[in-house]
Image: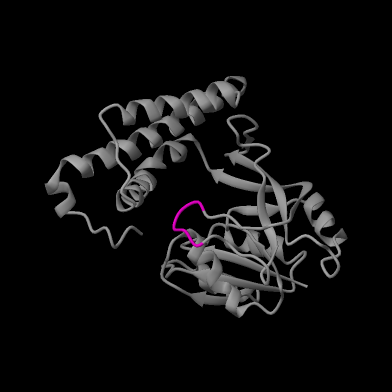
Amino acid sequence: MITGMVITLNESKNIIGCIESLLQVCSEIIIVDSNSTDNTVELAESLGAKVITQSYLGDGFQKNVGLDYASNEWVLSLDADERLTDEMVSEIKAVDLTTTNHDAFAFRRRNYIGSRWIKQCGWYPDFCIRLYNSKKTKFSEVKQHASVQAQNPKRIEADIIHYSFENLGQLFAKPGRNFSGRAAKIMYKKGKCANSFSPFTHGLNAFIRKYIFQKGFLGGVDGMTVALSSAVNSYLKYAKLLEYQRDPKVIENEDFDKIW
């Protein structure tokens, strides 16, 4: 028996498809919602999901909130914009979770922009642990880019689908959604430092990694765009960190206890 787990904030466009996908292999669904103002909660409850309301604590902390409410040891965690493929459903059903020696299973993830599957820039195969034994492991308790800290995971050679962005405009809006600002605040609180060259060098390195080493050049315009977006995000992160170091007025106007 598996518990499906999803964290949400205003996911009315995605939540029905996500829950219906999980119900193919899960006996219960738990939604941890951070005060949605749309009808995410109502839609989830209409499909039988248990909804827990929790103001956002950061990625890993939030994804662990629902564990105290789960009836099953095994948890399948999806983001609201992710779906199981038919192949993945079959693979999960074929695993004997009562006898396995593994504490978690990693899935390949197909990342999409619109209806376009992006196979370059490190976007595929993007292995990530999504099914895990909650008595043995859980998500790392960090506020950004959390992952399941499994000791003996196994890869399942099947895919889940991630509808990452509806279009290229959303991809370039990512830095504007304050991902870079959050990262800069976290780095500043940890005492990390930047110099005048840091924004440029980190931005350039991000572009080269995505476009050259992860073969973004094979992806045409989409590959170039993903590489450029990564570069912009990296540039802004270190530019903001440098700003915190150099400008006391900016520091005065920031609340470093409210990163989220």
**Residue closer to the observer: 137 or 181:** 137
Going by the picture, which residue comes out furthest to the left? Answer: 249
Image location (x, y in percent) of residue 65: 53, 72
Q: 83 or 228: nearer the eye?
A: 228
Q: Residue at x 62, y 35 (%)?
A: 116
The image quadrant of residue 120 is top right
Choose between 67 and 119: the one closer to the eye.
67
- Looking at the image, is 154 positioned above or below residue 69? above
Q: Residue at x 55, y 68 (%)?
A: 64
Segment colored magenta: 141-145
Which residue shows up at 54% across the image and 65% down it?
A: 63
Residue 27 in view (yes/no) = yes
* Main secondary structure of the magenta stretch: loop
Location of residue 236 in the rendering, given as x and y in whole percent from the top left corner: 33, 36
Q: Is residue 260 above or below residue 70?
A: above
Q: Is residue 35 left or right of residue 79?
A: left
